Amino acid sequence: MELNDPSAAECLRILLDDQCRNLRGTAQRIESLHLDGTRAMQPAQWLGPARAAHDRLAEQMLSNLTLARSAASHAADESARAAATLAGRVG
């Protein structure tokens, strides 16, 4: 692929736009899982060590979901930026 070839650059821009859309959808699904997990992880009857262990694991999982959502969102932003750069070169 030649960088100066408009058809190749346009194809890459289209692929980056698709990747951006997919990543934004992934970030939204992760955020939904985070919200569902927050609501689902409230065992009212648990006390003592079991509750403490549960809460630590739940906190860790929710933290990991937050990191995953942030990474997917950042990747989507970078894909959008790359597509916009290509659009400027092709257009």
Image (cartoon, helix red, strand yellow):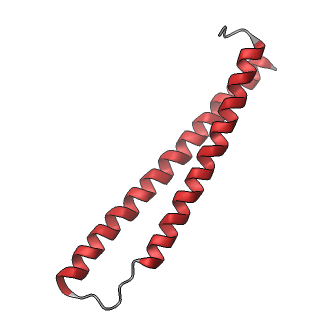
Q: Residue furthest left?
A: 49
User: What's the residue at 40%, 64% (across, down)?
Assistant: 62
Question: In the figure, residue 55 lies in which quadrant?
Answer: bottom left
Question: In the figure, residue 89 lies in which quadrant?
Answer: top right
User: What's the residue at 53%, 61% (across, down)?
Assistant: 31
The picture places residue 81, in percent across and down from the top left corner, at 64, 33
The count of marks equals 0
Depth check: 86 or 1 in front? 1
User: What's the residue at 75%, 25% (across, down)?
Assistant: 87
Q: Is residue 10 left or right of residue 60?
A: right
Up-down relation of residue 74 to residue 7 (above or below): below
The C terminus is located in which quarter? top right
User: What's the residue at 32%, 63% (across, down)?
Assistant: 60
The picture places residue 21, in percent across and down from the top left corner, at 67, 44
The picture places residue 73, in percent across and down from the top left corner, at 55, 47
The N terminus is located in which quarter? top right
Q: Is residue 84 left or right of residue 34?
A: right
Up-down relation of residue 76 to residue 12 (above or below): below
Q: Residue furthest right?
A: 91
Q: Is residue 88 left or right of residue 65?
A: right
Depth check: 85 or 29 in front? 29
Up-down relation of residue 90 to residue 78 (above or below): above
The picture places residue 16, in percent across and down from the top left corner, at 65, 32
Up-down relation of residue 59 to residue 41 (above or below): above
Q: Residue furthest bottom?
A: 45
